[in-house]
Every structure is written in C-alpha cells, then in structure tokens.
Image: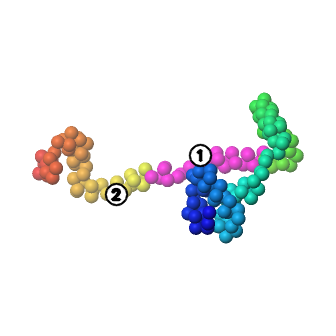
Amino acid sequence: MNCEETQRFLASFLNGKLSGAEAHAVRSHLASCANCASRLSRLDRIEIFPAIDEEVEPASDLSARFHSRLERHRQQQAEEARSGYRWLSRYLAWGWPRQAAAAASLVLLLAVGIYFGSHRTGPADQGATISEIGIAENLPLLQDMGVIENLDLLEDFDVIHNLPIGSPVSTGRH
C-alpha cells in the first residue's frame, strides 16, 4: 500500500471499519513510513505497534496477575461495604490541626448557607414586586386601551375560537 492509499483509508482504519487484511496493510504502511505515521496523533500511533512487532504476546503470568488483582479489588469493595463509616475512620486518622480545620470549615460553610438561605432577596422575590409596580404605574394606560374592560371576553376561549378569522371583535359596548 502506498502513501496515497493509506491516507484515503486512514479515517476508516482509525474508526475500526476496515477488514482485517486492509487494516493490516494500513498498519504495515504506517509502521514503515515515518511521513504517514507523523500525521497520526500520539494516541493513534498505538495502532501501529502490532505491525512493528509481529510477536506481541502477553506475559505468561497475565491471567494469574489479573485474577489476583480482581480478587483484591473485590475484597476491598466488600471491606468498604462492611465499614459504612470509612470516611469517619479517615477523618479520625488525621492529626488534630487538620481535624480542627476541617470541622471549622464545615461549620463556616453551614453558617453561610443558613444566613443566605434566610436572608434571600434574589430575583425571584423581586420579580413579582417589580411586575406589580409596572402594572400599577400603567393602570390608567391599560384602562384606556380597553384591556381590563374586555378581560372577560379574553378569558372566554369558546367565543374567541368560534369567531371567523379577520372579523372585528364587538363587545356590545359603545
């Protein structure tokens, strides 16, 4: 395979969409051509390792090491499940200055949360007040526009739905 063919198949190769023979050909070219290999990211260069060394074999004790690590991991998880207060034992293992600093930080955080929770004057509290002031200031304007006088008509959706499109609305008042 030449450089042009390799570049054409490179995206499919990296996405794992090539057949075994095509993937092997691209991998072999990348292993032998520094120019094409330099276009790969550092992580993608891992793909050419099997072509560089045809005899990549796992260590003979791989299975035993894997199973022992798996068993240690399972034992550790079981131990953590049995000792539900593992965080407390870690905290108690700290020296007293570190324990005092952690406790003081927790108390301070709790106090700040309580203070801001009880003295909250955020946008949600002010939003209703601002909109009520805006309505009160514009009440004469709204009355002149007939909005409030025809509010009952606007709330009766059956009447509005049955009106033909484009017809003027009559309130019966003049």
User: Does any portion of residue 5 appear in the rendered image?
Assistant: yes
Residue 82 falls left or right of residue 151: right
- The percent position of residue 48, horizontal first and vertical second, equals 70, 58
Q: Amino acid at mark 2?
A: Glu
Residue at image position (15%, 52%) is 166
Q: Secondary structure at mark 2?
A: helix
Q: Nearer the viewer, mark 2 or mark 1?
A: 1
Q: Amino acid at mark 1?
A: Ser
Where residue 61 sits, quadrant-wise, is top right
Residue beneath disc 2: 137
- The percent position of residue 55, horizontal first and vertical second, equals 78, 51
Residue beneath disc 1: 118
- The percent position of residue 112, horizontal first and vertical second, equals 66, 49
Residue 91 falls left or right of residue 146: right
Residue at image position (49%, 49%) is 125
Within-10-Å neighbours for mark 1: few <14, some 14–19, many 20+: few
Q: Which residues are magenta?
A: 103-127
Most extreme residue toward the right is 95
In the image, residue 104 lies in the stretch drawn in magenta: yes
Residue at image position (88%, 46%) is 95
